[in-house]
Image: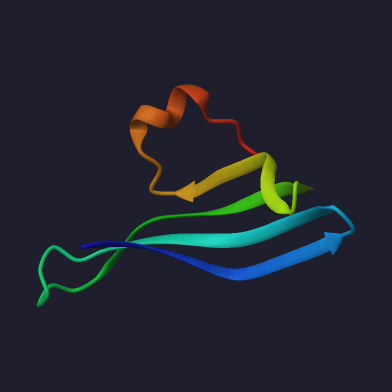
Amino acid sequence: TFKMLLTNLRITVNGNTATADMIWTGLNSETVTAVTTVVEQGHEHDELVKLNGRWVFKHRWVTSDGGMNPALLKTYQKR
């Protein structure tokens, strides 16, 4: 079973704009008796805007700090 934890969430709202920052951690357990392992971790920064009463993403930066899928290396930019 794979689970994604979003932690240390910080949201700052300024009128109809907002930013959100968080740490994400991917956990995996092969079976219910297996030890859970950390398979990836990183951080995220989002810019949001309020349109027609709903919050939508303006821009999203997702940065891997470890365990990144090798298929994503061609587009990876260290931040």
Q: Residue furthest front?
A: 52
Tell me which residue sits at (73%, 48%) in the image: 48
Asked whether, in this view, residue 55 is left or right of residue 31, the answer is: right
Asked whether, in this view, residue 37 is left or right of residue 47, the answer is: left
In-front residue for pair 16/74: 16
Q: Residue furthest top?
A: 74
Position in image of residue 2 (x %, y %): 26, 60
Tell me which residue sits at (64%, 68%) in the image: 9
Quadrant of the rendered structure where residue 8 is? Answer: bottom right
Q: How many marks?
A: 0
In-front residue for pair 75/21: 21
Q: Is 15 above or below relative to 72?
A: below
Q: Residue furthest right?
A: 15
Tell me which residue sits at (46%, 22%) in the image: 74
Position in image of residue 14 (x %, y %): 89, 59
Position in image of residue 79 (x %, y %): 67, 40
In-front residue for pair 66/3: 3
Q: What colouring method underlies this structural image?
A: rainbow
Tell me which residue sits at (70%, 58%) in the image: 20
Asked whether, in this view, residue 13 is left or right of residue 3, the answer is: right
In-front residue for pair 32/56: 56
Q: Is 59 above or below relative to 73?
A: below
The N terminus - image quarter = bottom left
